[in-house]
Amino acid sequence: MAAIADLNTQLLDITDNRAILKEVENIISLINPRFDFVYLDKVFNDVEKLFHGNYPGFRECNTRYHDLRHTLTVFLAMARLIHGAGLEGINFTDKEINIGLIGSLMHDTGYIQQRDDSTGTGAKYTLVHILRSIRFIQDYYKNDIYFRNDLGDFADILNCTGFSIDIDKIVFSSLKMEIMGKILGTADLLGQMADRFYLEKLVYLFYEFDEARVPGFDSEIDLLRKTINFYNMTKSRFQKNLSNVNRFMIRHFEKRWQTNRNLYDEAIEKNINYLKYILKSNQKNISVCLRRNAITIQ
């Protein structure tokens, strides 16, 4: 079985967008071998175009934390959790699976600027990006026969990714859609925090917060220090707000990869332990410790 540090690189080439799509489709086919991927394939292609600046009316993605890589890691984690949920006896319909996966692909479209918006970067929308993402989906499907009655479900599950949103106050259309929303909220956290370059990308996250005037962070180093508290908040959020749906991940790995290890939890622990080490031992040389992705910390 793959080493912890190689979660994404040995199980799957995370730099290959098509390999991620193929793996997601393999996973969903384990749930339903006859699943129709026509809707998912179209959205995947359009999201790629959107982030690359080839979608009508929109500029290329210019947020380096909330980039296409982040979206695709969430997309993959989403599929894995949905599969694990199925193994736990939660039988989602094909439409519910489509809503969940498409929601994961579009959950950060709110960071993308429209073509005539040339001021700053999409990071300025940090505090309203969920609302903008919901509007993007609603516009995308406003004339679609299959999904036009499900726009409320898309909004509900995307709202589960917001730390400031009280999930208990969301009135979901069904229990399964509530679970799907909590899976998306969980996948959003697992996908980013288990990333091999999570710590390096946190520097970019500070730049995004700084442009959006998100309070509470004085510098890149300050954000890195506060990431330890964020990690503890995340563990609490899994339990108190997201119904511990992260437990579904190990069922996926048991079935798909024949291991009883939760590789996401292990990768996150590895990232956080390394962060603790460099904050304690190398505060004057953090830029050296985090040079794997050629990010400069000032």
Image (cartoon, rainbow, N blue to C red):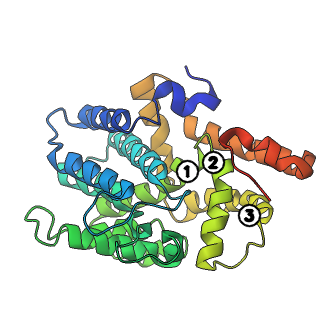
Q: Secondary structure at mark 2?
A: helix
Taking the spot 30% from the left edge, 58% from the top edge, the residue there is 176
Taking the spot 51% from the left edge, 53% from the top edge, the residue there is 244
Residue carrying label 3: 223
How many angstroms separate mark 1 from mark 2 (CA)? 6 Å
* Dot placed on the residue nearer the N-terminal end, 2 or 3: 2
Residue carrying label 2: 198
With respect to residue 290, does 13 lie above or below?
Answer: above
153 or 218: nearer the viewer: 218
Query: Does the image show residue 123?
Result: yes
User: Which x, y percent locates residue 194?
Assistant: 59, 44
Instruction: Please say if the residues under marks 1 and 3 sit with CB atoms less than 8 Å apart.
Output: no
Amino acid type, callout 1: Gln
How many angstroms separate mark 1 from mark 3 (CA)? 15 Å
Residue carrying label 1: 192
Quarter of the image containing the C terminus?
Answer: bottom right
Query: Of the numbered discs in the image, which one, if any, rests on residue 102?
Result: none
Amino acid type, callout 3: Leu
Amino acid type, callout 2: Tyr
User: Which x, y percent locates residue 146?
Assistant: 10, 61
* Dot placed on the residue nearer the N-terminal end, 1 or 2: 1
Taking the spot 41% from the left edge, 45% from the top edge, the residue there is 81
How many angstroms separate mark 2 from mark 3 (CA)? 13 Å
Taking the spot 10% from the left edge, 70% from the top edge, the residue there is 143
Query: Residue farthest to the top?
Result: 1
* Dot placed on the residue nearer the N-terminal end, 1 or 3: 1
Instruction: Please say if the residues under marks 1 and 2 sit with CB atoms less than 8 Å apart.
Output: yes
